[in-house]
Image (tube, rainbow, N blue to C red):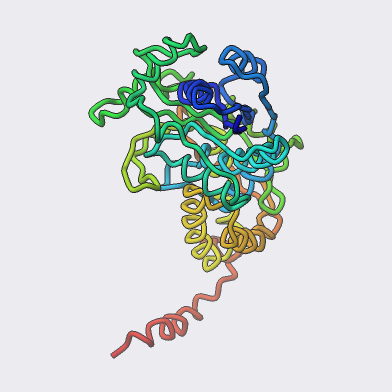
Amino acid sequence: MKKIVLAYSGGLDTTCCVKWLQERGYEVVCFSADLGSEFSPKELKTKAKSSGITKIYVKDLQSEFADSYILPALRAGAVYQNKYVLSTALGRPLIAKHLVDIAHKEKAGYIAHGCTGKGNDQVRIETATTLLDNKLRIIAPVREWELKSREEEIAYVRKHKLPLKITKEKIYSIDKNIWGISVEGGKLEDLDNEPPENSFYFVKPAEKVRDRVCYVSIKFDNGVPVALNGKKASFLSMIKSLNKLGADMGIGRTDLVEDRVVGIKSREIYEAPAAWLLHYAHNELESLTLDRQTQMLKKEIASQYAWLVYQGLWFTQIKRAMDAFIDVTQESVTGEITMKLYKGQISVAKREAKNPLYKKEFATYGAGDKFKQEYSEGFIRLMSMPYSK
């Protein structure tokens, strides 16, 4: 039998993929990356076994995901189309890396995934796999099979008595990890519909948040978060703590009509409280420590970085070059930002930096002003000279 390693999430598509591949003569080995998914490792193994799988790898990759994938994107300031913090997109190159490793270990010649033919993840996983090992063949059952809708997939699951938690009333496609949750499908496909409350999972709506103010401080060292509320913490533990706090304060919901890699527009909703809190604090610290030209260029790089991640080009030379630029910009990003949270809103309460470019003695209009205003006349003349007729 041909051996194939399937990226298995335990959701509707990959549950169907297992049976579909087996019916076509493949020996299926499953791989599940625990990035903080909705399914526990035990549940994934049970589901796979119930689907007829004899071998499944479930790896806890949360620390690797946080330190080697999320952190570089945070330091880059990468947010796609100003609303998406790339939670799913950042996980795909990591999944591809381990798919390739397991394929080598199992001496498998094939890799499979449950991504749709109009989605982004097919591009991300296949591109990353090709960059890592272009000899592996890739099978995408959802692009080939006869199942034309999620309703037909559910019928297929029920026909073959496969394990699945889903109803026709709540028919969303969900991807969850520590950096965020993405939800699409169902009523969200109609742009006339406000997102139903059952399409959100853990961030409270602002109207249901308790009427209270909360303060949270994040300390950075060279752009790396190192302490939360004055206590040293790993980046992973900080993400988990901020997710809980942010969700309780109504932080992190976004509703986006986005441009997919394949050229179509789609609507997705996202929940990412920790990501938005960390990005907010990091941006505030950069505004205090980076000169304006570096900030301007970094914003351009951040936009390109986000698009690169969105397309699945993680393992490329241009991405490594961008990382080198970002590393230099982060040498001065050391300090602490305190934020005020209130009913879904974030504002800055206090800024501190090791080497701030803000100097009160130059900014003040009160006593102690050291700015020599008489210099401005010559400065203005020089600034306007190229445009004078």
101 up-or-down from 355: above or below:
above
Q: Nearer the viewer, residue 145 or 98?
A: 145
Residue beneath the point at 53% across and 61% down: 298
35 up-or-down from 350: above or below:
above
Q: Position of residue 350 (x, y in %)?
A: 60, 44
Residue beneath the point at 65% across and 58% down: 330
Picture quarter with the C terminus:
bottom left
| Left-right relation of 273 to 227 | left
Q: Position of residue 193 (x, y in %)?
A: 26, 25
Q: Residue furthest left?
A: 192
Q: Position of residue 343 (x, y in %)?
A: 46, 27
Classify residue 275 by image quadrant. Answer: top right
Residue beneath the point at 49% across and 27% down: 24
Residue 214 visible in the shown view = no
Q: Position of residue 124 (x, y in %)?
A: 51, 45
Q: Residue furthest bottom?
A: 389
Residue 233 visible in the shown view = yes
Residue beneath the point at 61% across and 34% down: 216
